[in-house]
């Protein structure tokens, strides 16, 4: 799955767009996915800190994890 496909899936699940950021950075209180230096990361951004940080080798792995994570968080 690519980020574009991930975004489509999240929209279909009606997950609030303020709950996540697909472009990384340190959004306030949001689940994030980001590519840094050739690796992919998922994390929760809170008060300028990255928590629950996970590292992935591929976009596909990171996107699938991110989708599953948000489904779990939002009980879908």
Image (cartoon, rainbow, N blue to C red):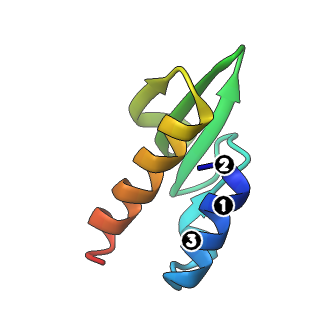
Relative to 30, say whether 44 is above or below: above
Q: CA distance from mark 3 to mark 2?
A: 11 Å
Q: Give the residue drawn at x 61%, y 35%.
A: 59
- Residue 5's tag is 1
Q: Give the residue drawn at x 35%, y 55%.
A: 69
- Side of 35 where 62 appears, left or right: left
Q: Earlier in the sequence, mark 3 or mark 2?
A: 2
Q: Quadrant of the C terminus?
A: bottom left
Relative to 16, say whether 65 is above or below: above
Q: Percent from the top left, x then y, of residue 63?
A: 53, 46
Relative to 34, say whether 46 is above or below: below
Secondary structure at badge 3 equals helix
Secondary structure at badge 1 equals helix
Q: Give the residue drawn at x 66%, y 48%.
A: 2
- Residue 9's tag is 3
Query: Toward the viewer: 65 or 32?
Result: 65
Residue that numbered label 2 is attached to: 2
Q: Percent from the top left, x then y, of residue 43?
A: 47, 40
Q: Are marks 1 and 3 in contact (CB under 8 Å)?
A: yes
Residue most extreme to the top: 37
Q: Give the residue drawn at x 40%, y 36%.
A: 51
């Amino acid at each position: 799955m690519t980020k574009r496909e991930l975004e489509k899936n999240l929209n279909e699940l009606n997950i609030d767009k303020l709950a996540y950021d697909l472009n990384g950075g340190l959004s306030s209180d949001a689940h994030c996915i980001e590519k840094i230096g050739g690796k992919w990361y998922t994390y929760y951004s809170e008060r300028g800190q990255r928590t629950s940080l996970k590292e992935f080798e591929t976009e596909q792995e990171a996107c699938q994890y991110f989708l599953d994570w948000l489904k779990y968080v939002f009980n879908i």
